[in-house]
Image (cartoon, grey):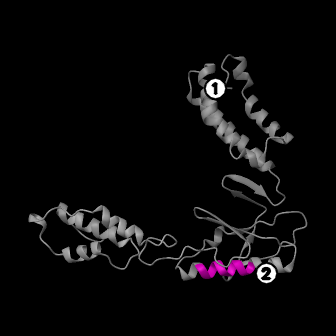
Amino acid sequence: MGDLVTRDMETAEVLNDFFASVFTSKCSRHTAQVAEGKGRHWENEESPTVEEDQVQHHLRNLKAYRSMGPEEMNLDMDSGIECTLSKFAEDTKLCGVVNTLEGRDAIQRDLDGLERWARANHMKFNKAKCKVLNMGWGNPKHSYRLGSEWIESSPEEKDLGVLIDEKLNMTQQHVLAAQKANCVLGCTKRSMNVRSREVILALYSALVRPHLEYCLQLWGPSIRRTWSCWNKSRGGHKADQRAGAPLL
């Protein structure tokens, strides 16, 4: 916080100041009291407290659509966006139909708008991680730029843990899920001395199934290749099973 404190009361005062500073209201009765209290000798004073009505006053004046910082950063990123914009944590995706030149221009205008929004809020996109995924058959594969830099195209991208390619083919996701399951099975084999059926089934349900069933509604188990990959992960330790140490 930038302050060197030596007493408990001084620590409480600094924390109180810091807590009050995150609210967007310019000034309130409580913050005025904090300002007046600076420089006091707290040896004979009561401990500073936060009253319920003071907190309610701050919350009533809090602007929910802005950040809680003193700069009041505007979080309304999707204002004026023509295409579909989705946000999750630090991940931002912009989607649009590009079968016409108007669609291409709309995406570029939205990218320009996002760049202006970032500059206005003293932020910047990590352009090294920005990619263009041209999806669908016969996609014209236009080029786009973010600011002054052109965005690279990518044949496949991972979105929330699911690998999707430009043809919406989930084959690589099937292979990835099977690889993760096999890695967990290998760790289980090397680390477990007790291999009774009850123990292995419990470990399988807790450690292996989440990898095989993550976002299953999207990439679906009905494809023949999915079962081929999964059968390899389930039957990769048949020698151990014949030896009386089943892993599944």
Please state which of residues 68 and 246 is positioned toward the viewer in this rendering. Answer: 68
Image: 231 above or below 42: above
Sequence-wise first label, 1 or 2: 2
Q: Position of residue 99 (x, y in %)?
A: 87, 73
Is 190 contained in the magenta span? Answer: no
Most common secondary structure along the magenta stretch: helix
Vertical position of residue 84 compared to residue 211: above or below = below
Q: Position of residue 211 (x, y in %)?
A: 67, 41
Q: Name the residue tied to disc 1.
A: 201
Which kind of residue does numbered mark 2 sit on? Asp
Please name the amino acid that badge 1 sits on: Leu
Q: CA distance from mark 1 to mark 2?
A: 54 Å
In the image, residue 224 lies at what x, y percent? 86, 40
Residues drawn in magenta:
108-117
Number of residues whose C-alpha sits closer than 10 Å to that of mark 2, classed few (under 14), some (14–19) or many (20 or more): some
Write the residue at 58% across / 78% down.
Answer: 118
Question: In the shown orientation, is residue 188 left or right of residue 111?
Answer: left
* Pointer 2 residue: 105
Q: Residue at x 49, y 69 (%)?
A: 64
